[in-house]
Image (spheres, rainbow, N blue to C red):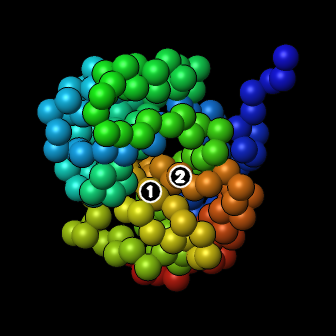
Amino acid sequence: MSELLSALPGASFKGLVAVEVAGLRGMITLRGDLGAATLKAAVKSVAGVNVPEARRTALAGETGAVWMSPDELLILGPYAEADIMTAKLAEALDGVHHLAVNVSDARALFRMTGPDWREVLSKLTPADLHPDAFGPEEIRRTRLAQVAAAFWMADEDTVQIVCFRSVAKYVFDLLSNAADSPAPVGHY
């Protein structure tokens, strides 16, 4: 049997912030009517959280839900339970128009830790990262240089970034280059 590996096993960089691959994480794309009672109940039963409002997260440890668009959530959980969570969503939403797909192996998750993460990310994204514009429990879907990505704060000094697995090396290199110690721009 093959060994399960994250996109860039053990990849890490220390500079203005620490950049590391966050490892394997269960990720499920759930599309449907986010205001529907049935969908809300399904998310609560599988992820243990309420459906987040627009551009918000609802996280409880390793599980939770992240708003991705007006009809899409990213459900997070333990990697080993992603197929089970997907099946539970499908069962709970049987007969309701929806799409629930385990995308764990199609995504990569990174973690940046350190008080200067806003400084680092601001070099790569057009998103406003000022603390008045982006704070805890918020998510931004945007671009990092030339690729699509999304990010949210895990705490004041930690941001998590998700992208397609196919561009994981590119994103890791971008983050590492932007976090290089001689590269501050004094934006924040």
Q: Amino acid at mark 1?
A: Phe
Say whether residue 85 is visible. no
User: Residue at position x 57%, y 26% from top?
Assistant: 79
What amino acid type should be assigned to the residue bearing mark 2? Answer: Val
Density class for disc 1 (Cα within 10 Å; few <14, some 14-19, many ≥20) is many
Numbered mark located on residue 55 in the image: none
Q: Nearer the viewer, residue 94 or 69?
A: 94
Whether residue 185 is visible:
yes
Q: CA distance from mark 1 to mark 2?
A: 6 Å
Measuring from the top left, give residue 158's x and y in whole percent.
44, 49
Q: Which mark is residue 162?
A: 2
- The residue at the point 44 percent across, 56 percent down is 151
Residue 105 location, quadrant? top right
Q: Residue 64 at what x, y percent from top left?
A: 35, 33
Would you say the residues marked 1 and 2 are in contact, meaning their CB atoms lie under 8 Å apart?
Answer: yes
* Residue position for label 1: 151
